[in-house]
Amino acid sequence: MAEDRLAWDELLAAGFLHALREAHRDATLAVLGSLSRAAGFTERSYGVSAFDVLATRIDRAFEDEPQVVRDDLNGSPGWRYGPYRILLKRHEFGNVRGIRWDRDSPTKQAVARQGYVEDPQLELPLGIQRDTPGVVTLVLAHSATDEPLELELFLGRPRWNADGGTAWHWVKELDDTLGPDPRRKLVERTMPLWDDHEDVPVRLRGETKSA
């Protein structure tokens, strides 16, 4: 099975993707509700705040989840479930496929140069796969607009695109098509088969006691 399907299915079944989507929504509403362009906050202000608040919300989402551990990379906040580590990347709204990893931070450049079996590429001399063997580092690309309020959230495997080509080996959107959250399984309430209480006398409306 292809890597994208394997990663997506495993993270989806665990509720990991639902937790990321929920954290992004909550972080976005918190930032947009606190910052005002009229007060002088710029796009850069929103970007920095959105990144920091999202990281905090993800920490909170997984604080009681032992299977998810904080796994930063060179100071960049990250979280790992099984073999998958997720880092954050804020992108220009509507341009997730136009990210230029070769112009990003050294850490993101290293992530984009991970070896990929379906499209082999050269790694950096001290690539991240040598430091953390068996771990696949993915990127959670997030963005939002305030007028109107719209959110974008994508998970994917970055591709080194110094050639000007596609920015992703694969990328998928975390939207409403994720389906029900497997972390919230409803427990059906069952009615008792009998009632231990004595029957309560019932009188029809308008009925009077006989003398």
Image (cartoon, helix red, strand yellow):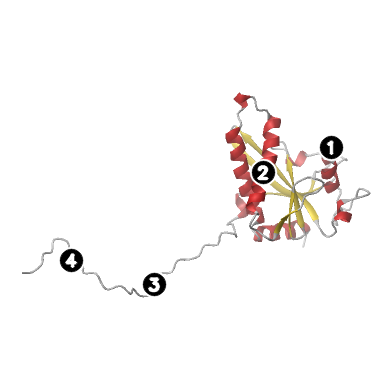
Q: Is residue 55 above or below residue 11?
A: above
Which residue is more in the foreground, 168 or 47? 47
State the residue in front, 164 or 189: 189
Percent x, y of residue 206: 13, 61
Residue type at numbered disc 3: Pro
Tell me the CA gap for discs 1 and 2.
23 Å
- Please tell me whether mark 2 sits on a helix, a strand or a loop: helix
Q: Position of residue 104 (x, y in %)?
A: 82, 39
- 154 or 38: nearer the viewer: 38
Decide if residue 77 is in sight here. Answer: yes
Residue appearing at x 89%, y 50% in the figure: 127
Q: Residue at x 73, y 38 (%)?
A: 91
User: Which of the numbered marks, if any, corresponds to residue 179?
Assistant: none
Secondary structure beneath dot 3 equals loop
Q: Earlier in the sequence, mark 2 or mark 3?
A: 2
Which residue is the site of mark 3?
A: 192
- Residue matched to label 1: 103
- Earlier along the polypeptide chain: callout 4 or callout 2? 2
Mark 4 vs 3: CB contact within 8 A: no
Mark 4 or 2: in front is 2
Characterize the local packing of mark 2: few (<14), some (14-19) or many (20 or more) Cα atoms within 10 angstroms: many
* C-alpha distance separating marks 3 and 1: 65 Å
Checking the image for residue 203, the label placed there is 4
Of the two numbered discs 1 and 2 on the same chain, state the one appearing first in sequence.
2
Q: Position of residue 10 (x, y in %)?
A: 70, 61
Identified at 67% across, 43% down, the residue is 54
10 Å crowding of disc 4: few (<14), some (14-19), many (20+): few
- Name the residue carrying label 2: 54
- Comparing labels 4 and 1, the label whose residue is closer to the camera: 4
- Is 102 left or right of 147, judged from the image as shown? right
